[in-house]
Amino acid sequence: MKLPGRKGVRSLFHFLHVSMTVPLRMMKKGSDPFPFLLLVFFCSFYGTANAECLVRGTGDLGIVIERASGSVQVVDTTAKTSLFRVEGLGDLSHASAVFSRDARYAYVFGRDGGLSKIDLLCGSLVKRVVQAGNSIGGAISQDGTLVAVSNYTPGGVKVFDAQTLAQVADLPAADEAGSLSKVVGLVDAPGQRFVYTLYDAGEIRSVDMHDPDKPQMQRFRDIGRLPYDALITPDGRYYIAGLFGEDGLAMLDLWQPQQGVRRILDNYGKGEEKLPVYKMPHLEGWAIAGRQAFLPAVGRHEVLVVDSDSWKEAGRIAVHGQPVFVVAQPDGRRVWVNFAHPLNDTVQVIDTRSLQVIHTLRPGKGVLHMEFTPRGEAVWISVRDADTVQVYDTASFKLLAELPAEKPSGIFFTSRAHRTGL
Amino acid sequence: MKLPGRKGVRSLFHFLHVSMTVPLRMMKKGSDPFPFLLLVFFCSFYGTANAECLVRGTGDLGIVIERASGSVQVVDTTAKTSLFRVEGLGDLSHASAVFSRDARYAYVFGRDGGLSKIDLLCGSLVKRVVQAGNSIGGAISQDGTLVAVSNYTPGGVKVFDAQTLAQVADLPAADEAGSLSKVVGLVDAPGQRFVYTLYDAGEIRSVDMHDPDKPQMQRFRDIGRLPYDALITPDGRYYIAGLFGEDGLAMLDLWQPQQGVRRILDNYGKGEEKLPVYKMPHLEGWAIAGRQAFLPAVGRHEVLVVDSDSWKEAGRIAVHGQPVFVVAQPDGRRVWVNFAHPLNDTVQVIDTRSLQVIHTLRPGKGVLHMEFTPRGEAVWISVRDADTVQVYDTASFKLLAELPAEKPSGIFFTSRAHRTGL
């Protein structure tokens, strides 16, 4: 814990002043001061315990993952400052996070199977459990009571009580032959569901967790070879998995699960195995803006435009490098794109109406992630090799603030608490 | 202030226990206890001052307007309980509210021109200004620094600093001849804009408030006769005003303001002046779910379905009464409808894919408002004549909780802080 809030410090000083001076002045000469001082000590302790935790709203908080040092910073997006650093979170390469529905706690999913619960108001690590050997992300249930983690080793999904981190369900990912499968693309969905994909088994599972003792599972087999990641549309209706072993994507309509999984965008990834793919693009990196989806082409310096009614390709936009994240401003008017190594010093901005690149920024080497403030007036960009997080005005592209951070990667704001599938 | 939080009470008791017993036990016989007791008093006071304000996240808070008593309740949507009642807010008939970007403060717009700032963590009225004789709602700017209020008497819009409620701009609503106009349909829009409509002058204005000393105003004249209300689509792109004096609606594309205002839905309201209209439906009561908009028909027992690409009517759904609010679940899968007097004891639920009414609830007489939890697992419904707020599970339609409230009307949750146009 660092950087106690100003209010806490002021309260503490005020308290010490009152508690030290008034009674000491009133004490009769010759009486023993020890009990007073002890009482002062207790009072101070009480004051300090409170002072460490901030009395403030949590709607404008967020965290920045510091991947190399296994720490996160708690940030304030109004003041554009850092409030706390929380350490001891283990291996945070590829880490992601979700938030409790009161927006007080962050749940951080580490690569080493660690699930850490962080108190944003106190800047403290509330609890950490190492729940598997190797994990790849998680989700929080619609009602905020359950946190699920998807695992590579030994595979499967484990579900925890969001308050205590006690395990409440284990969902192994065995196929018909009993082989365990890596799990990818875990998301929450409306109806208290978790939806995820079995990499080895080529299967999507949708689990209703209304009763954690009796998870109700729907299975969708033979969706295609080696699904490597997935996303859910912002309304929680369509779940789409990318396939490493073949072209196209597997889509499930969660409003009509009885129709099963269908293949969309047959050309997606076609023939791209012949190109060097520096980084398999994240599917969470899709942007859905109005009726259009914008997604990274695999291995090409292009962003694909897809009609989200027909799920057919509607255009391609030439960009600076191989896109990694393609993220829509909250108003859907522009999408922002970062790129794979070695062109990862650049961010480009595309107008969603004209489908033109309208601006290029060069924040520095190692642009890893971008997060918009909830109503989109600013974007926070992590620049790993410069050890900095930069904040830009989305209208003027002006640099508004820069915060030091140790090899920052993911940036996550508490407004995600109120969204599906994030 | 009422109902101190459990944590505060517990801390206070713990503190009193430590501060009373330990020093008294250690005090030597014969020494004067008065200074101890004084110190205990000071410490208790300190403890109480802190205990009144909660240390907790604000993502799951909200307010319920109690229109008859000029008060609001602060509620917790996780525990489904009331935390505080805040009184002295004046005339709250037709009141609405917006939230600060940190989700700590609510700004309540009263009918009597009062603008009240409420601290949700302390259950206190921070400040109240009576800024006009008669007002009709407000908005908070994209960056959260400015609160705007639209007025009937003397008309126009006033803009306040969100922290201090000091007035920072006055935007009178005079037409060419100098006549002042009532202002309706005030919303925030991306680009630090406020957009609003002049009732008497038939004009839409869009004001860029990046520099509050020099508001940049765009004016759109001759939009139609007597615009009575307006809405902005959730992405902040389309601003649509309803017309009392003629049929159809006036629409402005804020991405292409140079194209001016165009008329849509020519049939909207056509011939309805011959029907008794018990309550002019709110335009904020539109639901936009995917590519469809659902809106109350004027004077008829119907919900209209509109294609939000072409803005042409795509269907009509027969319902129980004259719809007032037509509200989409956050996942867009269903819309919920309440009705005008005398059929205001009922709520109906429409499936947005089949366009069928799939459920009817009867919460009681005087159903005035419905608010979904941010991820849609529950809906809160105010039932004025039963002096109650009811909480329903949106999947099972089961009544989950019921909270007493004095003539409740509007219900507003803090997740609105992160949305445009709410």
Image (tube, coloured by chain):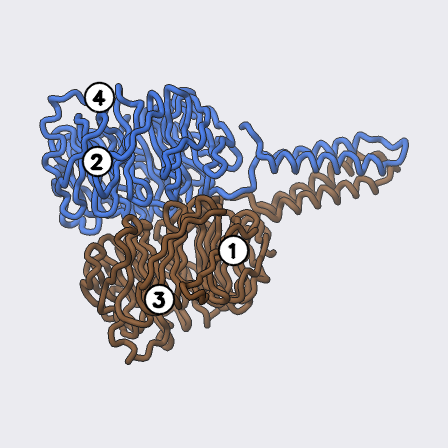
Chain colours: A blue, B brown
Reading the image, the residue beneath label 2 is A295
Reading the image, the residue beneath label 4 is A278
Q: Chain of mark 1?
A: B
Q: Are marks 1 and 3 on the same chain?
A: yes
Where is A112 relative to B53, above or below?
A: above
Q: Chain of mark 3?
A: B
Reading the image, the residue beneath label 1 is B74
Q: Amino acid at mark 3?
A: Pro
Q: Are marks 3 and 2 on the same chain?
A: no
Tell how many labels: 4
Which quadrant of the structure image shows residue B402? bottom left
3D distance between C-alphas at marks 2 and 1: 42 Å
Q: Amino acid at mark 2?
A: Leu
* Residue depicted at 12% across the width and 42% down the height: A312
Q: Percent x, y for residue A152?
A: 27, 27
Element under disc 2: strand
Q: Amino acid at mark 4?
A: Tyr
Q: Percent x, y for residue A55?
A: 56, 41
Residue A385 in sight in this render? yes
* Residue depicted at 12% across the width and 26% down the height: A272
Element under disc 4: loop
Of the numbered discs 1 and 3, the one sitting upstream in the chain is 1
Where is B37 relative to A383, above or below?
A: below
> How packed is label 2: few (under 14 Cα within 10 Å), some, or many (20 or more)?
many
Of the numbered discs 4 and 2, the one sitting upstream in the chain is 4
In this view, the residue in front, B369 or A397, is A397
